[in-house]
Amino acid sequence: MTVHDPLAPDRSGLAASLDVKLHNLDLAGRLALAAELGHAVFTTSLGIEDQVITAAIGTHRLPIEVSTLDTGRLFAQTSDLITETEERYGLSIRRFRPEQDDVDAYAAKYGANGFYESVEARHACCHVRKLVPLAKALAGADVWITGLRRGQSGNRAATPFAEYDVERNLLKINPLADWDIETICAHVAAEDIPVNALHARGYPSIGCEPCTRAIKPGEPERAGRWWWENDEKRECGLHVPDNAAQQIPQASQIAR
Ligand code: SF4
């Protein structure tokens, strides 16, 4: 449940003014400004836009912690890219993993791959493997930096540069909100940034292996994520409020 925070309007106002400032800066400037706001954590999925951000953090030696959610169901190519990226930019990417007890409880209730059976079961898996580790990754953070872009899906079309995350009580900065995929690819080529080998095989958006497929020509970037679900706004819960339409079960609600 969200605790009423009397300072929330101030933080929302700060986010609104930051949104204007960030608009006028380049990527390095946006990240530097985010780092000035307090303890900043960037959570990377190792996707192509996230690699652009990690490269900027490493190249400019910015004081931003880089973390990833190692769900235990990642593609081998993604795991390999974590190591390659660390070596390339001389930084350490913190891995946050699910609790084994939670994973076991999920498997006992839904089956190890129960996420194919219902939206509830899928959200429960994302909760255990992503949301709980995310909470640990963001513990103590003032600023959460993400690779969200408006062009990724209709659900993300209004992504601002800065917003106040009420549920997590921190500022959320999306420095690539206005970058389209063509700009991302051109930047990656120009800077020789390492990217996931799966992008070249038709995977523009890469999550867990059992929940990601290649897309067909003309499909939206995120069409390969949880493709068996019909909801156009499907997400894993990382970037939607807890009290939004998606009701994601708490780990404690999963029967052992
Ligand atoms: S993306 Fe799939 S495997 Fe990964 S946490 Fe969500 S439901 Fe589980």
Image (tube, grey):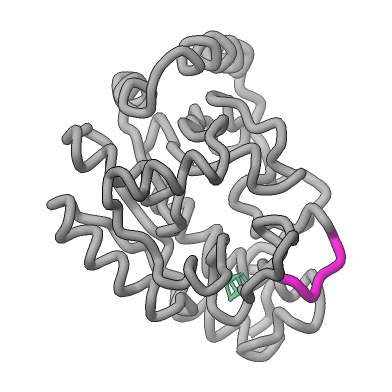
Count the labels in the image: 0
Q: Quadrant of the N terminus?
A: top right
Q: Answer whether residue 96 is visible to the viewer in this image.
A: yes
Residue situated in front as seen by the camera: 88 or 13: 88
Residue 137 image offset from top left, x and y in percent = 39, 51
Residue 206 image offset from top left, x and y in percent = 53, 66
Q: Which residues are magenta?
A: 226-231
Q: Residue at x 34, y 73 (%)?
A: 79
Residue situated in front as seen by the camera: 52 or 83: 52
Q: Residue at x 43, y 37 (%)?
A: 145
Locate residue 37: give its quadrant: top left
Q: Answer whether residue 123 is visible to the viewer in this image.
A: no
Determine the main secondary structure of the stretch shown in magenta.
loop
In the figure, is residue 185 to the left or right of 207? left
Q: Residue at x 56, y 68 (%)?
A: 203
In the figure, is residue 6 to the left or right of 51? right
**Vertical placement of 245 versus 164: above or below?**
below
Where does ligand 1 appear, by image quarter?
Answer: bottom right
Tell me, yes or no, whether the highlighted magenta stretch contains residue 211: no
In the figure, is residue 187 to the left or right of 122? left
